[in-house]
Amino acid sequence: MDQTSYIVFDLEWNQSAEGKQGEVRELPFEILEIGAVKLNSSLEPVGEFSCVIRPVVYTRLHYKVLEITHVGMEELKKRGVPFAEAVRSFLAWCEDTGEETENRPLSPPVFCTWGNMDLTELQRNMAFHGVENPFPYPLLYYDVQKLYNRLYLDNSKNRLPLEKAVEQLGLPPAEQFHRALDDARCTAEVMKKMNFRAVEEYLSLDYYRLPESSEEEIYLVFPDYSKFVSRKFPTREDAIADKTVTDLLCYRCRRMLRKKIRWFTGNQRYYYCLGECPEHGYVKGKIRMKHTPGGEVYAIKTIKLTDDAGAELIRRRKEETMDRRRVKNRLKNTGNTGRQSGL
Ligand SMILES: [Zn+2]
């Protein structure tokens, strides 16, 4: 029997009302409210948590926050508790998973959020306030918004607001959207109503803590793709020169594949390649180069099976990239020749 329990949570946060000028770099978003619902393994709610926080960094509400949130600065100052206190009671509440039988200890709950920002911002706020990070590494969670997209929106990259999903599923709207507890309740309702079991293998990875060494690099296998997250490198060139970054492994059979098209890029942000597994056919690789807040670079590589059409698409993309480069070089060379002939 699966005994997993879930913590569906939502945060409201504020940012500098004066824009970048008044921003504290270590804390672009200051958490104002935590709301959460605990679900048992059948996705039934078994408890709730709610807490407002007294802000100390940004004491005026940003206009965007004013527009959507229903919590005022007065309420926060009067009822809010210090962040460290709030998050400690939240974490204690999360850990309290109810009855534990002797021969079957309960596994730690899995966090679920609408979108991919809440866990990251929670940890950033914890670090800012000197609260120890108790989460496992790597930290896997459910991005319910992404699961919803996978189920109902053809896995599109467009992120649907929670209100829309609630409406599409015919659920009653929240009492107040953009109050943390109400949004957490709605997210939990969406989870229960949608076909969660069909997508429960698709855990998301939180990127707040990145691999510091090759031992900490992350490799995850999903039903239809694999994901690799590299350690940090000083530059993109260092990253793309690393063998583990550029290896093409069939995620089905773990065979190391020879590349039919080697890694290429048009914009230095996305790299593509194509290989072929003798057992599983065409395999395509994609690397996304990401910057850390400290200006370093890490690579996220995804590997997927593809078909003839998919392979053809990569061939064509490579051609286009080469064409663009040829045009660029020709322009550059013409320029040089011009200058040389002027000598
Ligand atoms: Zn294979």
Image (tube, rainbow, N blue to C red):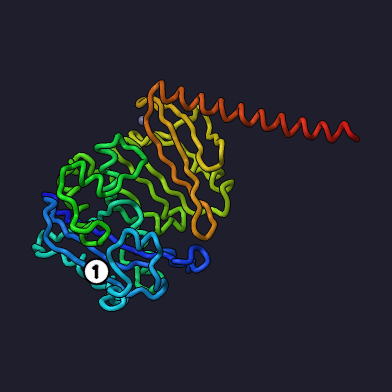
Residue drawn at the location 27% of the way across and 74% of the way down: 75
Mark 1: amino acid: Phe
Ligand 1 position by quadrant: top left
Within the image, what quadrant is residue 182 found in? bottom left
Q: Nearer the viewer, residue 19 or 309?
A: 19
Up the image or down, 125 lies above or below 113; here it is below
Residue tagged 1: 90
Q: Nearer the viewer, residue 316 or 25?
A: 25
Question: In which quadrant of the rendered view does residue 123 lie?
Answer: bottom left
- Please give the count of numbered marks on the rendered protein: 1
Is residue 265 placed above or below 161 in the rendered structure? above
Q: What residue is drawn where x is 41% and y is 22%?
A: 309
* Residue 128, position as x, y percentages in the image: 41, 71
Is 16 above or below relative to 274? below
x then y, percent, for residue 145: 28, 47
| Secondary element type, mark 1 | helix
Residue at (21, 62) in percent of width and height: 181
On-image quarter of the C terminus: top right
327 lies above or below 238: above
Q: Is residue 328 left or right of residue 314?
A: right
Residue 36 placement (x, y as % from top left): 21, 61
* Residue 7 at least partly seen: no
Q: Nearer the viewer, residue 322 or 145?
A: 145
Residue 24: image location, x then y, percent: 48, 69
Q: Is residue 170 visible?
A: yes
